[in-house]
Amino acid sequence: MKWNIYCIGHDFTRDIEQIVALFFEDPTLIFHRIEQKDINEIAKPAMAIAMEYGEEVTVGIQLFPPKGDQTYSISHGEKVEEEDGVARRKHCKRVMNKGLLKVLEHYAGMVQPWGILTGIRPTKLMHTLVQEGKKSEEARHILREERLVTPEKIDLLQQIVDRQLKVLPDLYQLNEKEVSIYIGIPFCPTKCAYCTFPAYSIQGQRKLIDPFIALLKEEIKLVGEYLN
């Protein structure tokens, strides 16, 4: 599906692409930079996404579907207190992402269980919160309120992190003779909408699993010998 995206007061095009891709398969987005006064001249189907900056950072979104006269609108604002430019920009993006997710969920009639997460391993985010000293309830609150992750998925993240720390209780305290190795598995039981990793649904790929595991074992052995 092709959408005209009208950006007012921001240039968060990459974030928009990632959120829209959660709802539509291979969407074509055409970006336009306009001013608020020109919003009546847009071409449907379209989304007009306007950012305003003051005591609160506010996003106002209007979604104009390809058919019909119904318009889906939302306004979402948050107090952005970060003074650092990079941190402040990230928070502003998060404000926009949350507003865009909510209006698209309303339009599409579906809920994204991973909220606004795109292109990140959710467990990595949970581990980061734990390392920062966040208690379980505080970490859950951040994931729910700041990232819009559903309680069910937060429970899953907590289970995985607890299991990993049980196996590797010193995961956060690697010494100078230890390394942390990430092994990319190219097969998943399902393909999460948010995921941008080069993995494939296991359906139709089962014949490749045994050869992959055999080569993975060999690679682990060789890397182990090299490290030793």
Image (cartoon, rainbow, N blue to C red):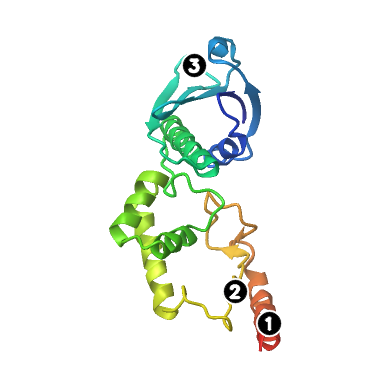
Work out whether residue 68 or residue 42 is closer to the camera in this orientation and state it.
Answer: 42
Q: Which residue is mark 1?
A: 223
Please determine whether, in this image, residue 202 is positioned above or below residue 226.
above
Is disc 2 surrounded by few (<14), some (14 to 19) or many (20+) residues within 10 Å?
few
In this orientation, which residue lies closer to the viewer: 139 or 195?
139
Q: CA distance from mark 3 to mark 1?
A: 60 Å
**Nearer the camera: disc 3 or disc 1:** 1
**Kind of residue at disc 3:** Gly
Q: Earlier in the sequence, mark 3 or mark 1?
A: 3
Write the residue at 35% across / 48% down.
Answer: 144
Q: The residue tagged with tag 3: helix, strand or loop? A: loop
In the picture, the quarter occupied by the C terminus is bottom right
> Are the residues flagged by discs 3 and 2 in contact, CB closer than 8 Å?
no
Within-10-Å neighbours for mark 3: few <14, some 14–19, many 20+: few
Label 3–label 1 contact, CB within 8 A: no
Q: Secondary structure at mark 2?
A: loop
Mark 1 secondary-structure assignment: helix
Residue furthest toward the front? 83
Q: Position of residue 169 (x, y in %)?
A: 41, 79
Quote the CA–CA distance across marks 3 and 2. 52 Å
- Residue 26 x %, y %: 64, 39
Residue 1 position by quadrant: top right
Q: Residue at x 53, y 62 (%)?
A: 189
Label 3 sits on residue: 68
> Where is residue 180 shown, x and y percent of the image?
57, 74
Q: Are marks 1 and 2 in contact (CB under 8 Å)?
A: yes
Question: Going from the N terminus, do you reach mark 1 or mark 2 first?
Answer: 2
Q: Amino acid type of disc 2?
A: Ile
- Residue carrying label 2: 181
